[in-house]
Each structure stands twice: as structure tokens, then as C-alpha cells.
Image (tube, rainbow, N blue to C red):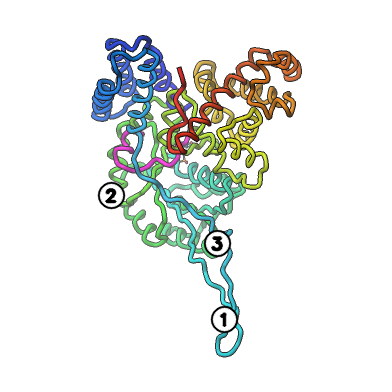
Amino acid sequence: MVLADLGSRLRGALSSVDSASEDEINSMVKNICTALLESDVNIKLVVKLRDNIKAKVKSELKENETSANKRKKLQKIIYDELCGLVDSHEEPPKPKKISQTKSQASTKVINGKKTKVVKSTGANSHIIMLVGLQGAGKTTSCTKLAVWYKKRGYKVGLVCADTFRAGAFDQLKQNAIKSNIPFYGNYHLTDPVQIAHMGVSTFKAEKFDIIIVDTSGRHRQEQSLFDEMVQISEMIKPTQTIMVMDGSIGQAAEPQAKAFKESSDFGSIILTKMDGHAKGGGAISAVAATHTPIVFIGTGEHVNDFETFKPTTFISKLLGIGDIQSLIEHVQSLDLQNDENHKQTMDNIKEGKFTLRDLQNQMNNFLKMGPLTNIASMIPGLSNIMSQVGEEETSKKIKNMIYIMDSMTQKELDSDGRIFTKEPSRIIRIAQGSGCSAAEIEMVLQQHRMMGSMAKSAMAASGGAPGGLPGN
Ligand code: GDP
């Protein structure tokens, strides 16, 4: 899990607050700041965060309030401040699907003859150029990015313009073949600018939606590397330049990001190797300080170990809150327009309803997305369990949730769950059918209730608000 240690320390600090006395709050703020500093978050940012929290506590928490209310407000303050810490407030560009746009044809009379005129839609391929130092994870991220977009219905091609590192083309080629992504490279040419140009032109002519270009890296930041980046960029005119940065380098991220920004003027960042590395906080806060959005984070070596980065989602996961909003958005981003179950779930959510079948649908959709633990971090209650019992046990729990829901009748699935309180014998029947204990079924029902109320609050907040903080 990303920054597992930082997450458990932040959760520990928050849950240590009981009566919300001044002493308790001060010690919580101190613990949060220490945890952030130890995961390498920039000291100036931590000091600012501490001051902001203290000021908000002073203005928002009232003397005569109940402790429960104070705790709720405190959670919201911490959540907002942490989101502010990792938010660049910039939006990366969104690619269009040009391969599916039809040219507009009409008939005109030209020189007395009826002639069919095809009007171009004017749409161009979205060209993404990846830059970064050697070993940062560029080539791996190229394939991850291509697979991510392909799963969402985009026509994607990969170009290997890395002629510096021996074997770079073979690596990209192997990854591309495994993931069934068209690729372009050349063993004989040594000029990366020429290869990039040829690859991009080939895919452009075939109306690819997205063309991803992998460029060379060097061990150190050298002028020759930056010169090459500029030349390729001038030739292929990328729509989006993404810097790939090793997330484990901590505070060194900031000078590195600045040096690349000057020469390649990248507009987005992919942070790699965020799988459990303690120093990840440094890279995240440093790049947020350069006002460049992190678009994805790499969380392992496998092609599916790749997550979109949204400050609210990231902090929700870190705090173990679970995030119904990102669950919904994640599923919405899949190509599910023709999926009847999905349509029904979206209609229900719009009405503020969330049945057990909706939970089942969402989980089935997520199974299409890769590692089960990605799902866990979005489900309230499961993210905490994951940090306590580990990924294997969590995967088992998720599979059990699916078996449990598969053992429910149609009536039960379409219900809001109250049917089980009225007729508890149903729980015994499901336990027998699914091979799970009654306690496990109670847990699924409890999670469903939490998600249902989050769905309601997400809708009430008209979409913009975070998925909701856990109620007390
Ligand atoms: P490049 O030189 O920038 O193209 O880097 P590569 O893509 O060849 O990656 C360098 C190493 O980092 C390889 O061993 C990758 O498997 C590994 N790697 C890349 N991304 C991640 C990640 O998100 N997590 C982990 N643990 N390893 C990664």
C-alpha cells in the first residue's frame, strides 16, 4: 500500500483524540507533523500546515460543543489541510477519442456537379511525451499509461525514442506485445528525433487517439539530455509532456523537478515506486509545491500497479476513510455505457439509493480493474483492515464479500439491507451458501450501510464534495 506507515501514523494520531481537549489536540497536531516530517515532507509546508490547523481549530471548534462534534470537525480540518498539501490546483489535459469521431460528409454543387464534401473534424491525436532520468520508471510507466487508456476505450500506440539505453526498445516491445498495444521503434536508426517523428506520424495517420513517446534518460541531469528533449519536443509538438520521477528520492524531488521544468516545461508528473516507500511524502509535497499536477502514481512493477492521483482520493485512502466518490468516478471512467447493471446503479445513486446489488455491481466492475487491494482502499472499513492484516488477508475478505453477495436472493440484492434486520434467518442461510460466518455477513451489511449513507451525502453535496468522512 502507498505510504502505509504514514497512513497508519496519521490514523493513529486522529483516533487518539477522545474528549478533544486542548492538550489532546496539541498532541495530535504534533504527532501528525512528526509523521509528515519523517516521511520527508518539506519542513516549510509542515509548519504552514500546523499553523493552519491551529488557526482553524481556534475559529471552528466551540467550547460548548460535544466531543463527538469536535472530533468530526477536527477530522475535516485535518483532511482539508492534507488535501491542500498535495494539491497543485492545476488540471491536466483530457484526451479526446478521435478514432470514434465520424467525419462530417455533405453534398455540395461544385462546377455544376453534385460533389460529396468530407469535412474534417479537426481533431488531432493526443501526443504524450514522457521524460525523466534513467531508472525512474519511464518505460514501465509508458506501458502502464497505455494500458490504462486502452481499458477506457482509447486507441493507443507506443513509440520508443530511447536510443541511449541499450535494450530500451526490446523492453518496450515486450511490454507492448504482452499488453496487446501497437508499438513503433527502430533497431537501425540512432537519431531519437527521427524515430519519434516517424512513430508519431505513423500513428497519427492511423487516427490513434493517444500516442505515447518514451524518450531517453541519463544517469544524471546533463545538458545533452535536455537538448535532446527539446529537439524531440519541437519535432513532435506533444499535447502533454509528463515527467516520470522516482517517488523514493524524497526531498531531492524538488530540484530535479525544477531542472526538468526549465528545459522540457512538462505539465504533469507520474510518481513511481510509491509502493510503501517511506519517503514518498517528500516527492508528493515537493511536486505540489511546483504547481504541477501528479497525474498517476506507480505502485509496483506490474502493469496494473498504477493509480490515478487525485488529492482528495489519495488523502481519503491515507486516512483510511474510504472514498465512495472515487469509487463512482473510477467506475464511470471505465467503458461501461452499454452495461445495463452499471446504468441501473448510476440511476439509483442519482436518486440517493444504494442497494446491495449496487455494491455487488461496483465490486464486479472493480474486479476488471486489477489488484483487489485497489478496491479495498476505497471501501470504508476495509482500508483500515488492510493496514492491519496485510494484502493477502484483505484479498480473501473481498472475495468472501463477493461470495456472500452471490448467495443473496434477487429480493435481498435489490433491498436497502433492512430486510436482514427484520428476518435474521436470512443471514444464516447466506452463511451456509457462501461458506462464510454470520459475522462476515454482518460486516458486509455494515459496509453497505456506510457506503449507502456516503452515496447520499455525495449526492447532497452535488458532486463536488469529498466522499464523506466517517460519521461518529
Ligand atoms: P526507465 O529507465 O526510466 O525507463 O525505467 P524502467 O521503466 O526500466 O524502470 C526501472 C526499474 O524500476 C524497473 O526494474 C521497474 O520494474 C521498476 N519500476 C518502475 N515503476 C515501478 C513502481 O511503480 N514500483 C516499483 N516497485 N518498481 C517500479
In this rendering, which labeled residue sits more in front, label 2 or label 3?
3
Amino acid residing under circle 3: Lys
Q: Position of residue 408 (x, y in %)?
A: 72, 24
Pointer 2 residue: 262
Pointer 3 residue: 207
Mark 3 is surrounded, within 10 Å at the Cα level, by few (under 14), some (14 to 19) or many (20 or more) other residues, namely: many
Q: Secondary structure at mark 1?
A: strand
Q: Which region shows up in magenta?
A: 284-298
Identify the residue at horizontal 63%, vertical 32% (top origin). Answer: 358
Count the labels in the image. 3
Q: Secondary structure at mark 3?
A: loop
Amino acid residing under circle 2: Glu
Viewer-proximal residue among 17 and 308: 17
Viewer-proximal residue among 237 and 310: 310
Q: Position of residue 230 (x, y in %)?
A: 34, 56
Viewer-proximal residue among 289 and 175: 289
Mark 2 → mark 1, Cα distance in angstroms: 50 Å
> Along the polypeptide, which appears first: circle 2 or circle 1?
1
Q: Position of residue 1 (x, y in %)?
A: 48, 26
Mark 3 → mark 1, Cα distance in angstroms: 26 Å
Q: As displayed, is residue 289 above or below residue 392?
A: below
- Taking the magenta stretch, the answer to whether it contains residue 294 is yes
Mark 2 is surrounded, within 10 Å at the Cα level, by few (under 14), some (14 to 19) or many (20 or more) other residues, namely: few
Q: Quadrant of the C terminus?
A: top left
Amino acid residing under circle 1: Lys
Pointer 1 residue: 108
